Amino acid sequence: MALAARRHHRRAPVVVLAMALLLTGSLYAALSASPAGAADRMGTDAVAAGEKLFQANCATCHGMGATGTADAPSLVGVGAAAVDFQVGTGRMPMAASGPQAPAKPVQMDAEQIAQLAAYVASLGDGPAIPSAEQVDPSRGDPATGMAVFRTNCAMCHNAVGAGGALSGGVSAPNLWNTSPTHLYEAMITGPGQMPVFNDINITPQEKRDVIAFIDQQGGTQPGGLDLGSLGPVSEGLWAWVLGLGLLIGAAVWIGARSS
Amino acid sequence: MTSIEKHQSPVHTGTGEGLPERFDDPGLPPHEPRRGDLDPAADKTSERIVLALFGLSTLGTIGFLVAYFALPTGQDAATIQRSNMALGLALACALLGIGAAAIHWAKSIMNNHERVEDRHSVASSPEVREAAVANLVAGAQDSGISRRGLLKSALVGSLALFPLTIVVPLVGEVGENWDVASFKRTLWRKGLRLTTDPSGRPIKAADVTVGSIWHVIPEGLEEAPHPLDEKAKAVVIVMRLDQADLVEAPERRDWSHEGIVAYSKICTHVGCPVALYEKDSHHLLCPCHQSTFDVADGCRVVFGPAKRPLPQLPITVDDEGYLVAQSDFTEPIGPSFWDRLR
Protein backbone atom coordinates (compact mmCIF):
# COMPACT_ATOMS: atom_id res chain seq x y z
CA MET A 1 0.00 0.00 0.00
CA ALA A 2 1.12 3.55 -0.72
CA LEU A 3 0.45 4.58 2.86
CA ALA A 4 2.79 1.98 4.26
CA ALA A 5 5.79 3.41 2.47
CA ARG A 6 5.27 6.78 4.21
CA ARG A 7 4.38 5.42 7.61
CA HIS A 8 6.31 7.23 10.34
CA HIS A 9 8.39 5.57 12.97
CA ARG A 10 6.69 5.96 16.34
CA ARG A 11 9.71 7.85 17.63
CA ALA A 12 9.68 10.30 14.73
CA PRO A 13 8.11 13.21 16.74
CA VAL A 14 10.88 12.92 19.31
CA VAL A 15 13.56 13.08 16.61
CA VAL A 16 11.88 16.10 14.99
CA LEU A 17 11.64 17.82 18.35
CA ALA A 18 15.31 17.15 19.09
CA MET A 19 16.35 18.50 15.69
CA ALA A 20 14.18 21.62 16.15
CA LEU A 21 15.74 22.28 19.54
CA LEU A 22 19.21 21.83 18.10
CA LEU A 23 18.44 24.25 15.20
CA THR A 24 16.94 26.87 17.53
CA GLY A 25 19.92 26.63 19.85
CA SER A 26 22.51 27.01 17.13
CA LEU A 27 20.57 29.87 15.51
CA TYR A 28 20.40 31.63 18.86
CA ALA A 29 24.12 31.15 19.34
CA ALA A 30 24.83 32.56 15.86
CA LEU A 31 22.57 35.59 16.34
CA SER A 32 23.57 36.48 19.89
CA ALA A 33 27.21 36.66 18.76
CA SER A 34 26.49 39.85 16.76
CA PRO A 35 24.90 43.02 18.18
CA ALA A 36 21.75 42.89 16.04
CA GLY A 37 20.14 40.77 13.37
CA ALA A 38 20.23 43.48 10.73
CA ALA A 39 23.99 43.72 10.89
CA ASP A 40 24.40 40.07 10.01
CA ARG A 41 23.76 40.67 6.34
CA MET A 42 26.44 43.33 6.16
CA GLY A 43 28.91 41.40 8.24
CA THR A 44 30.30 42.38 11.59
CA ASP A 45 33.54 43.64 10.02
CA ALA A 46 31.62 46.32 8.10
CA VAL A 47 29.77 47.35 11.24
CA ALA A 48 33.01 47.67 13.18
CA ALA A 49 34.64 49.66 10.37
CA GLY A 50 31.49 51.78 10.10
CA GLU A 51 31.56 52.48 13.82
CA LYS A 52 35.16 53.73 13.54
CA LEU A 53 34.18 55.97 10.61
CA PHE A 54 31.19 57.21 12.56
CA GLN A 55 33.24 58.10 15.60
CA ALA A 56 35.78 59.95 13.46
CA ASN A 57 33.32 61.85 11.20
CA CYS A 58 29.86 61.99 12.71
CA ALA A 59 30.00 61.57 16.47
CA THR A 60 30.83 65.25 17.12
CA CYS A 61 27.26 66.21 16.25
CA HIS A 62 25.29 62.94 16.43
CA GLY A 63 26.86 61.75 19.71
CA MET A 64 29.11 58.77 20.40
CA GLY A 65 26.32 56.21 20.28
CA ALA A 66 24.49 58.05 17.44
CA THR A 67 21.75 58.87 19.94
CA GLY A 68 21.72 62.53 18.96
CA THR A 69 22.73 65.81 20.62
CA ALA A 70 21.31 69.30 20.71
CA ASP A 71 22.92 69.91 17.27
CA ALA A 72 21.84 66.79 15.40
CA PRO A 73 19.12 64.13 15.57
CA SER A 74 19.45 60.57 16.83
CA LEU A 75 20.29 58.08 14.08
CA VAL A 76 18.83 55.06 15.83
CA GLY A 77 16.27 53.58 13.47
CA VAL A 78 16.88 55.85 10.48
CA GLY A 79 18.17 52.85 8.53
CA ALA A 80 20.82 52.29 5.88
CA ALA A 81 18.80 54.24 3.28
CA ALA A 82 19.15 57.51 5.21
CA VAL A 83 22.93 57.08 5.49
CA ASP A 84 23.29 56.14 1.83
CA PHE A 85 21.30 59.25 0.85
CA GLN A 86 22.88 61.78 3.23
CA VAL A 87 26.49 60.63 2.77
CA GLY A 88 26.09 59.46 -0.84
CA THR A 89 24.92 62.91 -2.00
CA GLY A 90 27.63 64.69 0.04
CA ARG A 91 25.10 66.28 2.40
CA MET A 92 26.80 64.59 5.35
CA PRO A 93 29.22 65.20 6.90
CA MET A 94 28.05 68.83 6.88
CA ALA A 95 30.61 71.55 6.25
CA ALA A 96 28.86 73.93 8.66
CA SER A 97 25.67 73.66 10.65
CA GLY A 98 22.74 75.54 9.10
CA PRO A 99 19.06 75.25 8.35
CA GLN A 100 19.72 72.84 5.49
CA ALA A 101 22.48 70.41 4.54
CA PRO A 102 23.39 71.30 0.94
CA ALA A 103 24.52 68.64 -1.53
CA LYS A 104 28.24 68.89 -2.18
CA PRO A 105 31.07 66.68 -3.50
CA VAL A 106 30.83 63.28 -1.82
CA GLN A 107 33.29 62.98 1.07
CA MET A 108 33.52 59.17 1.32
CA ASP A 109 33.98 56.31 -1.13
CA ALA A 110 31.32 53.67 -1.81
CA GLU A 111 32.86 51.15 0.59
CA GLN A 112 33.02 53.64 3.46
CA ILE A 113 29.41 54.65 2.84
CA ALA A 114 28.38 50.98 2.92
CA GLN A 115 30.27 50.49 6.20
CA LEU A 116 28.68 53.57 7.78
CA ALA A 117 25.26 52.42 6.55
CA ALA A 118 25.87 48.95 8.05
CA TYR A 119 26.79 50.52 11.39
CA VAL A 120 23.75 52.81 11.52
CA ALA A 121 21.45 49.99 10.36
CA SER A 122 22.80 47.86 13.21
CA LEU A 123 21.55 50.42 15.76
CA GLY A 124 17.88 49.85 15.01
CA ASP A 125 15.49 48.80 12.26
CA GLY A 126 14.99 51.33 9.48
CA PRO A 127 14.48 51.52 5.72
CA ALA A 128 17.07 49.57 3.74
CA ILE A 129 18.85 50.71 0.58
CA PRO A 130 16.55 49.84 -2.38
CA SER A 131 17.65 47.29 -4.95
CA ALA A 132 18.62 48.31 -8.49
CA GLU A 133 15.38 46.76 -9.73
CA GLN A 134 13.27 48.82 -7.31
CA VAL A 135 14.60 52.08 -8.73
CA ASP A 136 14.92 51.13 -12.42
CA PRO A 137 13.21 53.96 -14.38
CA SER A 138 12.59 51.64 -17.36
CA ARG A 139 10.25 49.54 -15.17
CA GLY A 140 8.18 52.56 -14.14
CA ASP A 141 5.29 54.27 -15.90
CA PRO A 142 6.08 57.98 -16.35
CA ALA A 143 2.40 58.91 -16.84
CA THR A 144 1.34 57.47 -13.47
CA GLY A 145 4.54 58.90 -12.02
CA MET A 146 3.54 62.34 -13.23
CA ALA A 147 0.13 62.09 -11.50
CA VAL A 148 1.75 60.95 -8.24
CA PHE A 149 4.51 63.56 -8.51
CA ARG A 150 2.12 66.44 -9.18
CA THR A 151 -0.02 65.48 -6.16
CA ASN A 152 2.73 64.77 -3.66
CA CYS A 153 5.98 66.42 -4.77
CA ALA A 154 5.42 69.22 -7.29
CA MET A 155 4.37 71.88 -4.78
CA CYS A 156 7.90 71.98 -3.36
CA HIS A 157 10.04 70.50 -6.13
CA ASN A 158 8.25 72.29 -9.05
CA ALA A 159 6.09 70.59 -11.68
CA VAL A 160 9.12 69.23 -13.56
CA GLY A 161 11.37 68.72 -10.52
CA ALA A 162 13.42 71.91 -10.99
CA GLY A 163 13.26 72.72 -7.26
CA GLY A 164 11.91 75.71 -5.36
CA ALA A 165 12.14 77.92 -2.28
CA LEU A 166 10.71 77.16 1.17
CA SER A 167 10.80 79.13 4.41
CA GLY A 168 13.59 79.82 6.89
CA GLY A 169 16.55 79.38 4.53
CA VAL A 170 15.32 75.99 3.35
CA SER A 171 14.76 75.06 -0.28
CA ALA A 172 13.66 72.00 -2.20
CA PRO A 173 16.50 70.91 -4.51
CA ASN A 174 16.45 70.27 -8.23
CA LEU A 175 15.99 66.54 -8.92
CA TRP A 176 17.31 66.17 -12.46
CA ASN A 177 20.78 64.95 -11.55
CA THR A 178 19.80 62.94 -8.48
CA SER A 179 20.39 59.22 -8.96
CA PRO A 180 17.29 56.95 -8.95
CA THR A 181 18.51 55.23 -5.76
CA HIS A 182 18.87 58.57 -3.97
CA LEU A 183 15.41 59.66 -5.19
CA TYR A 184 13.91 56.49 -3.74
CA GLU A 185 15.81 56.90 -0.46
CA ALA A 186 14.68 60.51 -0.12
CA MET A 187 11.03 59.41 -0.44
CA ILE A 188 11.31 56.69 2.25
CA THR A 189 13.51 58.63 4.71
CA GLY A 190 12.37 62.27 4.31
CA PRO A 191 15.68 64.15 4.57
CA GLY A 192 15.65 67.57 6.26
CA GLN A 193 12.25 69.25 6.16
CA MET A 194 10.92 66.80 3.55
CA PRO A 195 8.06 64.62 4.79
CA VAL A 196 8.34 60.83 4.73
CA PHE A 197 6.41 58.95 2.04
CA ASN A 198 6.19 55.35 3.23
CA ASP A 199 5.29 52.38 1.05
CA ILE A 200 1.57 52.62 1.83
CA ASN A 201 1.34 56.34 1.04
CA ILE A 202 3.24 55.96 -2.24
CA THR A 203 3.60 52.28 -3.13
CA PRO A 204 7.00 50.93 -4.27
CA GLN A 205 5.62 50.69 -7.83
CA GLU A 206 4.43 54.32 -7.67
CA LYS A 207 7.85 55.35 -6.38
CA ARG A 208 9.39 53.70 -9.43
CA ASP A 209 6.84 55.51 -11.62
CA VAL A 210 7.90 58.82 -10.05
CA ILE A 211 11.54 57.98 -10.78
CA ALA A 212 10.58 57.20 -14.39
CA PHE A 213 8.87 60.62 -14.64
CA ILE A 214 11.87 62.48 -13.17
CA ASP A 215 14.13 60.54 -15.53
CA GLN A 216 12.39 62.25 -18.46
CA GLN A 217 12.64 65.80 -17.09
CA GLY A 218 15.37 68.38 -17.47
CA GLY A 219 16.53 67.30 -20.92
CA THR A 220 16.82 69.45 -24.03
CA GLN A 221 13.87 71.80 -24.46
CA PRO A 222 12.40 71.83 -27.99
CA GLY A 223 11.58 75.53 -27.65
CA GLY A 224 15.10 76.68 -26.84
CA LEU A 225 16.33 78.06 -23.50
CA ASP A 226 14.37 76.73 -20.49
CA LEU A 227 15.54 79.57 -18.18
CA GLY A 228 15.84 77.06 -15.35
CA SER A 229 12.24 75.79 -15.79
CA LEU A 230 11.40 77.92 -12.74
CA GLY A 231 8.23 79.41 -14.17
CA PRO A 232 7.03 83.00 -13.99
CA VAL A 233 9.94 84.45 -11.97
CA SER A 234 12.77 83.73 -14.38
CA GLU A 235 10.54 84.05 -17.44
CA GLY A 236 9.11 87.35 -16.23
CA LEU A 237 12.56 88.70 -15.42
CA TRP A 238 13.70 87.76 -18.91
CA ALA A 239 10.67 89.31 -20.63
CA TRP A 240 10.49 92.52 -18.54
CA VAL A 241 14.17 93.30 -18.22
CA LEU A 242 15.66 91.99 -21.45
CA GLY A 243 12.67 92.06 -23.81
CA LEU A 244 11.25 95.38 -22.69
CA GLY A 245 14.75 96.86 -22.32
CA LEU A 246 15.53 96.03 -25.95
CA LEU A 247 12.23 97.58 -27.10
CA ILE A 248 12.90 100.78 -25.14
CA GLY A 249 16.43 100.89 -26.52
CA ALA A 250 15.10 100.55 -30.08
CA ALA A 251 12.51 103.30 -29.50
CA VAL A 252 15.18 105.65 -28.14
CA TRP A 253 17.46 104.93 -31.10
CA ILE A 254 14.66 105.54 -33.63
CA GLY A 255 13.74 108.85 -31.95
CA ALA A 256 17.28 110.16 -31.39
CA ARG A 257 18.85 112.69 -33.73
CA SER A 258 21.55 111.41 -36.00
CA SER A 259 24.92 113.05 -35.30
CA MET B 1 3.69 129.00 -40.67
CA THR B 2 6.43 127.54 -38.51
CA SER B 3 6.91 127.82 -34.81
CA ILE B 4 10.49 128.92 -35.37
CA GLU B 5 9.13 132.20 -36.69
CA LYS B 6 6.95 132.59 -33.58
CA HIS B 7 9.97 132.70 -31.24
CA GLN B 8 9.18 134.91 -28.29
CA SER B 9 11.06 135.68 -25.11
CA PRO B 10 9.53 134.29 -21.92
CA VAL B 11 7.13 136.68 -20.19
CA HIS B 12 8.31 137.39 -16.65
CA THR B 13 5.08 138.11 -14.83
CA GLY B 14 5.43 135.61 -12.01
CA THR B 15 5.69 136.38 -8.33
CA GLY B 16 8.56 135.71 -5.98
CA GLU B 17 11.90 133.97 -6.61
CA GLY B 18 11.94 135.47 -10.09
CA LEU B 19 10.10 132.48 -11.63
CA PRO B 20 7.67 133.13 -14.49
CA GLU B 21 4.03 132.18 -13.93
CA ARG B 22 4.10 130.12 -17.07
CA PHE B 23 6.70 129.18 -19.63
CA ASP B 24 6.18 129.92 -23.28
CA ASP B 25 6.85 127.34 -25.97
CA PRO B 26 10.60 127.67 -26.62
CA GLY B 27 10.14 126.27 -30.16
CA LEU B 28 12.61 124.01 -31.90
CA PRO B 29 16.36 124.21 -31.19
CA PRO B 30 18.42 125.65 -34.04
CA HIS B 31 19.09 123.32 -36.95
CA GLU B 32 22.41 121.50 -36.72
CA PRO B 33 23.89 119.82 -39.77
CA ARG B 34 25.01 116.21 -39.40
CA ARG B 35 28.53 115.06 -40.12
CA GLY B 36 27.32 113.50 -43.34
CA ASP B 37 25.90 116.83 -44.51
CA LEU B 38 29.34 118.45 -44.33
CA ASP B 39 31.73 115.58 -44.95
CA PRO B 40 31.17 113.37 -48.05
CA ALA B 41 33.31 110.65 -46.45
CA ALA B 42 30.95 110.44 -43.46
CA ASP B 43 28.00 110.29 -45.86
CA LYS B 44 29.73 107.41 -47.67
CA THR B 45 30.24 105.62 -44.31
CA SER B 46 26.53 105.91 -43.52
CA GLU B 47 25.71 104.46 -46.90
CA ARG B 48 28.05 101.55 -46.23
CA ILE B 49 26.39 100.88 -42.86
CA VAL B 50 22.97 100.78 -44.52
CA LEU B 51 24.39 98.47 -47.18
CA ALA B 52 25.85 96.20 -44.49
CA LEU B 53 22.48 96.03 -42.68
CA PHE B 54 20.71 95.04 -45.90
CA GLY B 55 23.50 92.51 -46.41
CA LEU B 56 22.85 91.09 -42.92
CA SER B 57 19.18 90.74 -43.83
CA THR B 58 20.06 88.92 -47.07
CA LEU B 59 22.39 86.59 -45.19
CA GLY B 60 19.62 85.98 -42.64
CA THR B 61 17.18 84.98 -45.38
CA ILE B 62 19.74 82.69 -47.03
CA GLY B 63 20.60 81.27 -43.59
CA PHE B 64 16.91 80.63 -42.93
CA LEU B 65 16.54 78.68 -46.17
CA VAL B 66 19.74 76.73 -45.51
CA ALA B 67 18.59 75.93 -41.95
CA TYR B 68 15.18 74.86 -43.24
CA PHE B 69 16.63 72.31 -45.62
CA ALA B 70 19.84 71.33 -43.83
CA LEU B 71 18.49 70.96 -40.28
CA PRO B 72 15.34 68.82 -40.50
CA THR B 73 13.45 68.07 -37.28
CA GLY B 74 13.26 64.52 -35.99
CA GLN B 75 11.24 63.01 -33.16
CA ASP B 76 13.71 64.06 -30.47
CA ALA B 77 13.88 67.36 -28.62
CA ALA B 78 17.49 68.04 -29.64
CA THR B 79 16.83 68.31 -33.38
CA ILE B 80 13.66 70.35 -32.81
CA GLN B 81 15.59 72.75 -30.59
CA ARG B 82 18.43 73.00 -33.15
CA SER B 83 15.98 73.76 -35.95
CA ASN B 84 13.98 76.27 -33.88
CA MET B 85 17.08 78.15 -32.74
CA ALA B 86 18.59 78.33 -36.26
CA LEU B 87 15.32 79.38 -37.94
CA GLY B 88 14.58 81.95 -35.24
CA LEU B 89 18.01 83.56 -35.27
CA ALA B 90 18.09 83.69 -39.09
CA LEU B 91 14.59 85.18 -39.21
CA ALA B 92 15.58 87.78 -36.61
CA CYS B 93 18.62 88.80 -38.71
CA ALA B 94 16.52 88.96 -41.88
CA LEU B 95 13.82 91.23 -40.42
CA LEU B 96 15.95 93.30 -38.04
CA GLY B 97 18.41 93.94 -40.89
CA ILE B 98 15.70 95.46 -43.09
CA GLY B 99 14.21 97.49 -40.25
CA ALA B 100 17.51 98.83 -38.94
CA ALA B 101 18.72 99.62 -42.47
CA ALA B 102 15.54 101.58 -43.29
CA ILE B 103 15.80 103.62 -40.09
CA HIS B 104 19.50 104.29 -40.45
CA TRP B 105 18.92 105.31 -44.09
CA ALA B 106 16.21 107.76 -43.04
CA LYS B 107 18.21 109.15 -40.13
CA SER B 108 21.64 109.59 -41.66
CA ILE B 109 21.19 109.92 -45.44
CA MET B 110 17.79 111.53 -46.09
CA ASN B 111 17.51 115.25 -45.40
CA ASN B 112 16.97 116.29 -41.79
CA HIS B 113 15.20 119.62 -42.16
CA GLU B 114 12.79 120.20 -39.26
CA ARG B 115 9.23 120.80 -40.43
CA VAL B 116 6.22 121.80 -38.40
CA GLU B 117 2.68 121.08 -39.54
CA ASP B 118 0.05 122.81 -37.38
CA ARG B 119 -3.13 120.86 -36.69
CA HIS B 120 -6.22 122.12 -38.45
CA SER B 121 -9.11 123.06 -36.17
CA VAL B 122 -11.27 120.16 -35.03
CA ALA B 123 -14.65 121.87 -35.56
CA SER B 124 -16.21 121.96 -39.05
CA SER B 125 -17.00 125.23 -40.69
CA PRO B 126 -20.30 126.97 -39.62
CA GLU B 127 -21.92 126.31 -43.02
CA VAL B 128 -21.24 122.56 -42.84
CA ARG B 129 -22.60 122.39 -39.29
CA GLU B 130 -25.78 124.28 -40.19
CA ALA B 131 -26.36 122.00 -43.19
CA ALA B 132 -25.95 118.89 -41.00
CA VAL B 133 -28.48 120.13 -38.43
CA ALA B 134 -30.94 121.05 -41.22
CA ASN B 135 -30.61 117.53 -42.67
CA LEU B 136 -31.33 115.95 -39.29
CA VAL B 137 -34.36 118.11 -38.66
CA ALA B 138 -35.73 117.38 -42.14
CA GLY B 139 -35.24 113.66 -41.62
CA ALA B 140 -37.03 113.71 -38.27
CA GLN B 141 -39.95 115.65 -39.74
CA ASP B 142 -40.15 113.27 -42.68
CA SER B 143 -40.26 110.21 -40.41
CA GLY B 144 -43.09 111.74 -38.42
CA ILE B 145 -41.67 110.41 -35.17
CA SER B 146 -43.46 113.07 -33.10
CA ARG B 147 -46.87 112.24 -34.63
CA ARG B 148 -46.64 108.43 -34.92
CA GLY B 149 -46.41 107.47 -31.23
CA LEU B 150 -46.82 103.73 -31.80
CA LEU B 151 -43.85 103.60 -34.16
CA LYS B 152 -41.80 105.57 -31.69
CA SER B 153 -42.61 103.10 -28.88
CA ALA B 154 -41.82 100.15 -31.15
CA LEU B 155 -38.43 101.67 -32.01
CA VAL B 156 -37.53 102.32 -28.36
CA GLY B 157 -38.81 98.89 -27.33
CA SER B 158 -36.81 96.97 -29.91
CA LEU B 159 -33.66 98.93 -29.11
CA ALA B 160 -34.14 98.24 -25.42
CA LEU B 161 -34.75 94.51 -25.97
CA PHE B 162 -31.79 93.88 -28.27
CA PRO B 163 -29.07 93.84 -25.54
CA LEU B 164 -30.75 90.73 -24.08
CA THR B 165 -29.13 88.72 -26.92
CA ILE B 166 -25.78 89.60 -25.36
CA VAL B 167 -26.67 89.64 -21.67
CA VAL B 168 -28.62 86.37 -21.41
CA PRO B 169 -25.92 84.05 -22.88
CA LEU B 170 -23.25 85.96 -20.95
CA VAL B 171 -24.97 85.38 -17.62
CA GLY B 172 -26.01 81.86 -18.64
CA GLU B 173 -22.42 80.83 -19.43
CA VAL B 174 -21.17 81.97 -16.04
CA GLY B 175 -22.36 78.72 -14.51
CA GLU B 176 -25.25 76.36 -14.48
CA ASN B 177 -25.26 76.15 -10.71
CA TRP B 178 -26.66 79.17 -8.94
CA ASP B 179 -26.91 77.39 -5.61
CA VAL B 180 -24.56 79.49 -3.48
CA ALA B 181 -25.02 77.07 -0.59
CA SER B 182 -22.87 74.55 -2.48
CA PHE B 183 -19.85 76.67 -1.50
CA LYS B 184 -20.58 75.79 2.09
CA ARG B 185 -20.57 72.00 1.85
CA THR B 186 -18.25 69.38 0.45
CA LEU B 187 -18.47 65.66 -0.28
CA TRP B 188 -17.26 64.80 3.26
CA ARG B 189 -19.85 63.24 5.55
CA LYS B 190 -19.92 61.09 8.66
CA GLY B 191 -18.14 57.77 8.16
CA LEU B 192 -16.70 58.52 4.71
CA ARG B 193 -13.22 57.06 4.37
CA LEU B 194 -10.14 59.12 3.64
CA THR B 195 -8.33 57.77 0.55
CA THR B 196 -5.06 58.60 -1.20
CA ASP B 197 -5.01 61.06 -4.08
CA PRO B 198 -4.96 60.07 -6.93
CA SER B 199 -5.10 56.27 -6.46
CA GLY B 200 -8.05 56.15 -4.03
CA ARG B 201 -6.67 53.63 -1.50
CA PRO B 202 -8.23 53.86 1.99
CA ILE B 203 -5.74 54.84 4.68
CA LYS B 204 -5.15 52.86 7.89
CA ALA B 205 -4.36 55.14 10.83
CA ALA B 206 -1.49 52.83 11.81
CA ASP B 207 0.22 53.45 8.45
CA VAL B 208 0.33 57.20 8.92
CA THR B 209 3.77 57.63 10.48
CA VAL B 210 5.01 60.74 12.28
CA GLY B 211 6.51 63.23 9.83
CA SER B 212 4.54 62.07 6.79
CA ILE B 213 1.98 63.97 4.74
CA TRP B 214 -0.89 62.33 2.86
CA HIS B 215 -2.80 63.95 0.05
CA VAL B 216 -6.37 62.81 0.50
CA ILE B 217 -9.64 62.66 -1.42
CA PRO B 218 -12.97 61.32 -0.14
CA GLU B 219 -13.81 57.71 -0.96
CA GLY B 220 -16.01 57.39 -4.05
CA LEU B 221 -15.04 60.79 -5.44
CA GLU B 222 -15.03 59.45 -9.00
CA GLU B 223 -18.70 58.41 -8.69
CA ALA B 224 -19.79 61.98 -7.86
CA PRO B 225 -21.73 63.77 -10.65
CA HIS B 226 -18.90 66.32 -11.09
CA PRO B 227 -15.75 64.70 -9.68
CA LEU B 228 -13.41 67.62 -10.49
CA ASP B 229 -15.73 70.23 -8.97
CA GLU B 230 -16.09 68.09 -5.85
CA LYS B 231 -12.36 67.43 -5.69
CA ALA B 232 -11.65 71.15 -5.85
CA LYS B 233 -13.55 71.57 -2.57
CA ALA B 234 -12.91 68.28 -0.78
CA VAL B 235 -9.12 67.82 -1.08
CA VAL B 236 -7.54 67.33 2.32
CA ILE B 237 -4.04 66.90 3.68
CA VAL B 238 -3.39 64.54 6.54
CA MET B 239 -0.30 64.79 8.72
CA ARG B 240 0.81 62.99 11.83
CA LEU B 241 2.61 64.99 14.48
CA ASP B 242 4.24 63.94 17.68
CA GLN B 243 1.38 64.40 20.14
CA ALA B 244 3.69 66.42 22.40
CA ASP B 245 4.02 69.02 19.62
CA LEU B 246 0.30 69.33 18.97
CA VAL B 247 -1.62 72.24 20.48
CA GLU B 248 -5.37 71.60 20.19
CA ALA B 249 -8.29 73.81 21.07
CA PRO B 250 -10.45 72.17 23.80
CA GLU B 251 -13.47 71.88 21.50
CA ARG B 252 -11.34 70.20 18.84
CA ARG B 253 -9.63 67.63 21.11
CA ASP B 254 -11.54 64.75 19.54
CA TRP B 255 -11.13 65.96 15.94
CA SER B 256 -7.72 64.31 15.61
CA HIS B 257 -6.64 60.70 16.10
CA GLU B 258 -3.41 60.00 17.99
CA GLY B 259 -1.68 63.04 16.52
CA ILE B 260 -3.17 62.57 13.02
CA VAL B 261 -4.82 65.79 11.84
CA ALA B 262 -6.67 66.56 8.61
CA TYR B 263 -6.95 70.04 7.12
CA SER B 264 -8.47 71.45 3.96
CA LYS B 265 -5.86 71.83 1.21
CA ILE B 266 -7.53 74.95 -0.18
CA CYS B 267 -5.90 78.22 0.93
CA THR B 268 -8.21 80.67 2.71
CA HIS B 269 -6.60 83.52 0.75
CA VAL B 270 -7.46 82.85 -2.89
CA GLY B 271 -7.84 79.08 -3.00
CA CYS B 272 -4.49 77.69 -4.13
CA PRO B 273 -3.60 74.16 -2.96
CA VAL B 274 -1.57 74.60 0.26
CA ALA B 275 0.78 71.65 0.36
CA LEU B 276 4.38 72.66 0.91
CA TYR B 277 4.94 70.87 4.22
CA GLU B 278 8.04 71.23 6.34
CA LYS B 279 7.94 68.24 8.67
CA ASP B 280 10.27 69.66 11.36
CA SER B 281 8.85 73.18 11.67
CA HIS B 282 5.28 71.90 11.03
CA HIS B 283 4.80 74.75 8.60
CA LEU B 284 2.45 74.46 5.64
CA LEU B 285 3.16 76.94 2.85
CA CYS B 286 0.94 78.09 0.04
CA PRO B 287 2.87 78.13 -3.25
CA CYS B 288 1.01 81.17 -4.64
CA HIS B 289 1.49 83.93 -2.05
CA GLN B 290 3.55 82.26 0.66
CA SER B 291 0.80 82.18 3.29
CA THR B 292 2.22 80.00 6.04
CA PHE B 293 0.11 77.90 8.44
CA ASP B 294 1.28 76.23 11.64
CA VAL B 295 -0.07 72.67 11.60
CA ALA B 296 0.92 72.14 15.24
CA ASP B 297 -1.33 75.03 16.30
CA GLY B 298 -4.63 74.53 14.47
CA CYS B 299 -3.18 75.72 11.12
CA ARG B 300 -2.98 79.27 12.51
CA VAL B 301 -1.71 81.79 9.93
CA VAL B 302 1.89 82.68 10.86
CA PHE B 303 2.79 84.59 7.69
CA GLY B 304 1.29 85.85 4.46
CA PRO B 305 -1.97 87.30 3.19
CA ALA B 306 -4.37 84.54 4.35
CA LYS B 307 -6.80 85.76 7.01
CA ARG B 308 -8.22 82.52 8.44
CA PRO B 309 -6.71 79.24 9.57
CA LEU B 310 -7.25 76.30 7.22
CA PRO B 311 -10.55 74.57 8.10
CA GLN B 312 -10.00 71.32 9.99
CA LEU B 313 -11.78 68.10 9.02
CA PRO B 314 -12.86 66.15 12.13
CA ILE B 315 -11.60 62.58 11.72
CA THR B 316 -11.65 59.30 13.61
CA VAL B 317 -11.08 55.63 12.78
CA ASP B 318 -13.67 53.01 11.85
CA ASP B 319 -13.88 49.41 13.12
CA GLU B 320 -11.25 48.26 10.62
CA GLY B 321 -8.77 50.96 11.62
CA TYR B 322 -9.25 53.12 8.54
CA LEU B 323 -9.38 56.91 8.84
CA VAL B 324 -12.91 58.27 8.36
CA ALA B 325 -14.49 61.71 8.56
CA GLN B 326 -16.67 62.55 11.56
CA SER B 327 -18.69 65.01 9.50
CA ASP B 328 -18.27 67.61 6.76
CA PHE B 329 -16.10 70.66 7.44
CA THR B 330 -17.75 72.79 10.11
CA GLU B 331 -17.07 76.01 8.15
CA PRO B 332 -16.86 76.84 4.42
CA ILE B 333 -13.49 75.93 2.93
CA GLY B 334 -11.37 78.19 0.75
CA PRO B 335 -11.33 81.93 0.21
CA SER B 336 -13.91 84.49 1.29
CA PHE B 337 -17.02 85.04 -0.85
CA TRP B 338 -19.96 87.37 -0.49
CA ASP B 339 -21.63 85.23 2.14
CA ARG B 340 -18.41 84.82 4.06
CA LEU B 341 -16.42 88.00 4.19
CA ARG B 342 -14.44 87.18 7.30
Image (cartoon, coloured by chain):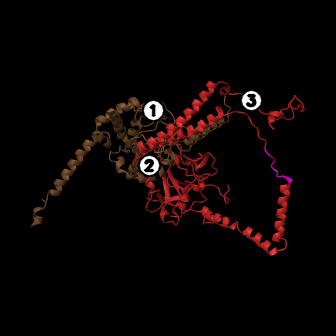
Chain colours: A brown, B red
User: Residues under labels 1 and 3: Cα distance?
Assistant: 71 Å
Report the amino acid beneath label 2.
Answer: Phe
Could you tell me if residue A175 is visible in this image?
no
For badge 1, the amino acid type reads Met
Left or right, A155 with respect to B152, comes to left
Image position of A247 (left or right of A71)? right
Residue A53 location, quadrant: top left
* Mark before the other along the chain sequence, 2 or 1: 1
Q: Which residue is mark 3?
A: B31
The region drawn magenta spans B119-126
**Mark 2 sits on what residue?**
A197
Asked if the magenta segment contains residue B125, the reply would be yes
Left or right: B220 as drawn, with respect to B33: left
Query: Which residue type carries mark 3?
Result: His
Residue toward you, A81 or A217:
A217
Judge the density around disc 3: few (<14), some (14-19), many (≥20) Cα neighbours within 10 Å: few
> Would you say the magenta stretch is mainly helix, strand or loop?
loop
For disc 1, the chain is A
